[in-house]
């Protein structure tokens, strides 16, 4: 085997790996996140999980991809560890589909239909159809279908190139000696595991083994331990994916590794016990592509059946190896939805991002409620809780911003791009609501530490306007979380009412200062608090505009200034009625304070 054969082998491997990647990613994009949602909804028991794991993996041609998705779903709290175990078992079965497809190269017949089914015919036809769709179609889904076909064609082209490159090895005695040495089960398992870990795909390493089988030198005795080792090596991808994830996500990767290591150990013992007692008549015969595919399938199906009754024990083993840490579990809950593994599926990533923005909004709403109470009764413990929540909000804003920017670099549909833009804008609004709430807390702390008292009337005024601001924040959170246009349209009349209340309260407070009924220090804190409330209501108004722009299918969004101008012009009857309702509820109440 000369230098040029090695180059051809490396090139064939590159094509094979790229084809597999293109095929899998094309199928994933075409699914639009439905595969992950199916995993989430239909894993109520282990049997369902196994079937779904097998189907999903068979569709996307990669057990590593499926287990990485499972790790992400567990990290986000969507799947429980026990649900994940069934999916992981099924993924091991589903990954055997690739090897069974590759064995079609062994078909031999003069029948036209059989000849047509051979990869040597299907691969170029798929590649031709794929490139036509990729280059000629304007629709995203058709281009994705073209990528799938092109990936299929490239995968087999790489396979054929590797077969051609390794053919001279059949004449080399050294090559035969190497594979004879791999008949040692421990060495064979190690080689299979290491090679698969390097290329991070058991399907790819099985494909390489099938290509090498065309030399006629690989025997059943050398292939069996290599195939078992390949199932261990494929665990490296979810292990790497679990780095930085929460405890349960790490346990999912641990289950995958434990399942394959224990399964390999059991299968090795049984296989070699039979060989050394009864003996397999084919043990030293050359193995074909079909033999490799069949043993790969047999190994994974049998180990799954054997372990099905012991799902609980696998879960306990993972919990024993990776123990719980309460502090880490609390920290994980903050950003667990923003899992990088979901970036492979933009639809699911956007859904998870929305849920995280809503969690951020809930924290901002909670902080305002706490801070408004501190104005009349400051409590250092509550203030500390507010600061902790604000730290979480800041972390969420940072993580969400980076996550959505990375997601925007993916190939997205127009609605997905618009939704990401809306989320980026809404993140900033809720973060600012949190900031202004903290400013209110700092004003309350200043009054407390300096023993400065507000007048009873000032407290009464702040109580009423706090109720109005609490309501507008609740409307903003509801309209965003539920895509509720009714709540969104109620925000602007309430925001105008709050502005009118603030103008009135500022005017009254200046009068109190002139009459000496309030100190300057107390006055500054009072006015700062009003300003913070006014800005909070402005940000709630912005949220409403973004939601109306999105839900109303305004392609370029809604012009906030034009919308406000139209509402304030008095031409909208519903707006006028709502403004009157809020004015009666809040503004008139403030006016009537004695």
Image: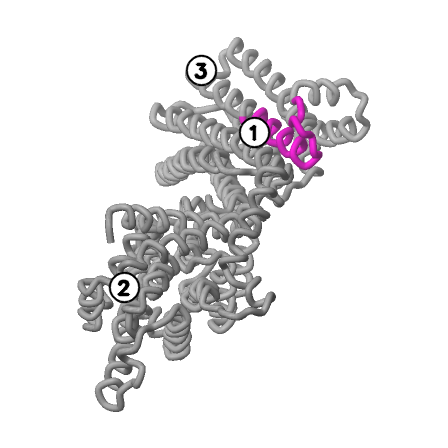
Name the residue carrying label 2.
Answer: 170
Q: Residue furthest bottom?
A: 278
As rendered, which of 340 and 128 lies closer to the eye? 128
Locate residue 127, reporting x and y percent: 53, 48
Name the residue carrying label 1.
Answer: 460
Q: Compared with residue 577, is residue 73 higher up or lower down, i.e. above or below?
A: below
Q: Determine the CA span between mark 2 and mark 1.
A: 93 Å
Q: Determine the CA span between mark 2 and mark 3.
A: 97 Å
Q: Is residue 142 visible?
A: yes
- Contact between marks 2 and 1 (CB within 8 A): the answer is no
On-image quarter of the C terminus: top right
As rendered, which of 233 and 170 lies closer to the eye? 170
Name the residue carrying label 3.
Answer: 519
Q: Earlier in the sequence, mark 2 or mark 1?
A: 2
Picture quadrant of residue 252: bottom left
- Span shown in magenta: 536-559
Q: Is residue 255 visible?
A: no
Q: Residue at x 53, y 46 (%)?
A: 147
Q: Residue at x 40, y 39 (%)?
A: 392
- Magenta segment's dominant SS is helix
């Amino acid at each position: 085997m000369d230098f040029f054969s090695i180059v051809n082998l490396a090139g064939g491997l590159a094509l094979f790996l790229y084809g597999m990647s293109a095929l899998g990613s094309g199928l994933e994009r075409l699914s639009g996140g439905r595969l992950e949602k199916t995993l989430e909804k239909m894993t109520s028991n282990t049997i369902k999980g196994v079937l779904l794991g097998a189907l999903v993996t068979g569709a996307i041609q990669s057990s590593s991809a499926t287990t990485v998705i499972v790790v992400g779903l567990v990290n986000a709290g969507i799947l429980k560890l026990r649900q994940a175990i069934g999916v992981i078992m099924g993924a091991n079965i589903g990954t055997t589909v690739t090897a069974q497809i590759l064995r079609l190269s062994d078909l031999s017949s003069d029948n036209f239909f059989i000849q047509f089914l051979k990869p040597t015919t299907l691969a170029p036809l798929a590649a031709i159809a794929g490139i036509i769709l990729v280059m000629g179609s304007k629709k995203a889904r058709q281009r994705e279908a073209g990528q799938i076909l092109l990936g299929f064609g490239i995968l087999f082209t790489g396979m054929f190139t590797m077969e051609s490159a390794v053919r001279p090895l059949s004449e080399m005695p050294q090559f035969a000696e190497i594979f004879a040495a791999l008949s040692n089960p421990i060495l064979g398992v190690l080689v299979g595991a290491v090679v698969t870990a390097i290329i991070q795909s058991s399907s790819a390493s099985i494909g390489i083994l099938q290509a090498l089988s065309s030399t006629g030198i690989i025997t059943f005795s050398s292939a069996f331990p290599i195939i078992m080792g390949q199932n261990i090596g494929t665990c490296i991808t979810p292990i790497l994916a679990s780095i930085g994830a929460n405890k349960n996500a790490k346990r999912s990767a641990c289950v995958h590794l434990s399942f394959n290591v224990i399964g390999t150990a059991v299968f090795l013992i049984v296989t070699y016990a039979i060989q050394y007692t009864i003996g397999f008549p084919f043990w030293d015969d050359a193995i074909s592509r079909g033999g490799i595919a069949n043993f790969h399938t047999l190994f994974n199906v049998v180990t799954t059946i054997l372990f099905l009754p012991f799902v609980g024990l696998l879960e306990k083993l993972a919990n024993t190896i990776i123990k719980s840490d309460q502090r880490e579990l609390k920290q994980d809950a903050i950003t667990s939805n923003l899992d990088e593994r979901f970036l492979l599926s933009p639809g699911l990533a956007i859904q998870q991002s929305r849920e995280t923005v809503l969690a951020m909004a809930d924290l901002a709403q909670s902080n305002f409620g706490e801070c408004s109470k501190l104005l009349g009764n400051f409590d250092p413990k509550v203030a500390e809780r507010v600061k902790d929540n604000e730290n979480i909000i800041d972390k969420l804003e940072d993580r969400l911003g980076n996550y959505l920017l990375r997601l925007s670099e993916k190939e997205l549909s127009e609605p997905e791009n618009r939704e990401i833009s809306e989320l980026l804008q809404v993140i900033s609004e809720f973060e600012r609501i949190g900031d202004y709430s903290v400013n209110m807390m700092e004003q309350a702390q200043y009054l407390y530490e300096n023993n400065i008292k507000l007048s009873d009337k000032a407290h009464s005024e702040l109580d009423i306007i706090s109720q109005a601001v609490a309501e507008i924040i609740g409307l903003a959170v509801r309209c965003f979380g539920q895509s509720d246009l009714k709540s969104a349209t109620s925000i602007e009349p309430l925001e105008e009412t709050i502005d009118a209340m603030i103008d009135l309260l500022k005017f009254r407070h200046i009068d109190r200062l002139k009459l000496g009924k309030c100190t300057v220090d107390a006055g500054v804190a009072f006015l700062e608090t009003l300003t913070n409330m006014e800005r909070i209501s402005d940000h709630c108004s912005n949220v409403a505009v973004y939601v109306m722009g999105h839900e109303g299918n305004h392609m370029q969004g809604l012009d906030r200034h034009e919308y406000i101008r139209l509402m304030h012009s008095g031409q909208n009857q519903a707006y006028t009625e709502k403004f009157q309702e809020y004015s009666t509820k809040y503004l008139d109440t403030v006016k009537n304070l004695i």
